[in-house]
Image (spheres, rainbow, N blue to C red):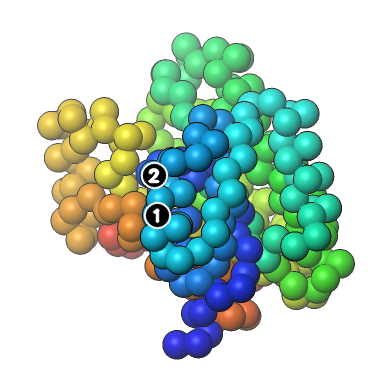
């Protein structure tokens, strides 16, 4: 079990304020990691995720960054890469979604989703990952999606971005594996969070989704935590470029 121990390591989790990101941060802290949480609306102190991390006996730092702002993301990457205490684990989880039929999906929505869900992810990984390659050690974990594999409905920008995240995961893994940096992704299935509330409130859509999931239920954000700890740990030392579905069997159906 020591292979899953993250004691003494520093993890950065973006989109950490709630939902999947909060669960990832909590799981990493429970495994021993100190956490830097990043989110556009993260409270400077007293946030729910900070309380989770502190309750696990680990330190927490809050950073507020708008991932739609390219300059802000570049500044965040430069800050993290230059710190005296190096970042051991980068969880690139921040994201957004805009729903509209393709013929009505405007340029502004497209540009916003691609910036937050893909461009910002690369910008941050480039800065932090570059420092990791110099140390020949590090873990980068992206949050992909079932729509990294499928097309979805009325979310063309999100689907394009999440396909891009899958490709970026493989591209960075190919370059950085020789330097001891593991780059992988987690593809959550249908998880009960604020982002899926509208789907769960729609009896027809929710019923169709549940009929497709072999496990027969929506996942919880905590289900993503175990996969995060695995990919961040020494247990995944020979895992490179993988996109790990945590989906109740959806993709196997």
- In the image shown, does 31 or 116 lie closer to the viewer? 31
**Compared to 173, does 105 lie above or below?**
above
Q: Residue 132 sits in which quadrant?
A: bottom right
Residue 38: percent from left, percent from top: 58, 42
Instruction: Identify the image quadrant of the N terminus.
Output: bottom left
Residue 48: which numbered mark, if any?
2
Report the residue at 51% width, 30% height from top: 41
Most distant residue in the bottom direction: 1
Report the residue at 59% width, 49% height from top: 61
Judging from the image, what secondary structure is the residue with disc 2 in? helix
Horizontal side of residue 27 vs 128, given as left or right = left
Report the residue at 73% width, 40% height from top: 76
- In the image shown, does 183 or 68 lie closer to the viewer? 68
Instruction: Quickly name the residue at label 1.
Output: 52
Instruction: Identify the image quadrant of the C terminus.
Output: bottom left
Residue 28: percent from left, percent from top: 48, 64
- Is residue 160 visible in this depiction of the protein? no
How crowded is the residue under tag 1: few (<14 C-alpha within 10 Å), some, or many (20+)?
A: some
Q: How far, Cα to Cα, is label 1 from label 2?
A: 6 Å
Horizontal side of residue 212 vs 230, given as left or right = left
How crowded is the residue under tag 2: few (<14 C-alpha within 10 Å), some, or many (20+)?
A: some
Contact, mark 1 vs mark 2 (Cβ under 8 Å) = yes
**Compared to 85, does 188 lie above or below?**
above
- Is residue 128 visible in this depiction of the protein? yes
**Compared to 200, does 176 lie above or below?**
below
Judging from the image, what secondary structure is the residue with disc 1 in? helix
Report the residue at 39% width, 44% height from top: 48
Residue 141: percent from left, percent from top: 58, 59
């Amino acid at each position: 079990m020591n292979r899953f121990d993250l004691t003494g390591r520093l993890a950065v989790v973006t989109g950490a304020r709630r939902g999947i990101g909060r669960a990832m941060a909590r799981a990493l802290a429970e495994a021993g990691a100190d956490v830097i949480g990043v989110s556009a609306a993260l409270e400077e102190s007293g946030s729910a995720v900070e309380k989770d991390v502190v309750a696990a006996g680990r330190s927490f730092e809050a950073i507020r960054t708008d991932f739609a702002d390219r300059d802000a993301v570049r500044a965040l990457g430069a800050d993290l890469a230059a710190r005296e205490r190096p970042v051991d684990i980068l969880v690139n989880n921040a994201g957004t979604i805009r729903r509209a039929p393709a013929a009505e999906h405007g340029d502004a929505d497209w540009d916003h989703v691609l910036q937050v869900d893909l461009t910002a992810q690369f910008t941050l990984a480039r800065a932090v990952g570059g420092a990791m390659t110099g140390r020949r050690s590090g873990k980068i974990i992206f949050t992909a999606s079932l729509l990294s594999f499928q097309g979805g409905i009325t979310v063309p920008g999100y689907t394009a971005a999440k396909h891009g995240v899958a490709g970026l995961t493989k591209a960075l893994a190919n370059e950085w594996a020789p330097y001891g940096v593991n780059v992988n992704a987690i593809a959550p299935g249908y998880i009960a969070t604020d982002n899926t509330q509208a789907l769960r409130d729609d009896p027809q859509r929710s019923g169709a989704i549940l009929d497709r999931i072999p496990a027969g239920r929506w996942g919880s954000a905590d289900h993503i935590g175990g996969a995060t700890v695995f990919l961040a740990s020494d247990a995944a030392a020979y895992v490179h470029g993988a996109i790990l579905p945590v989906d109740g069997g959806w993709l196997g159906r």
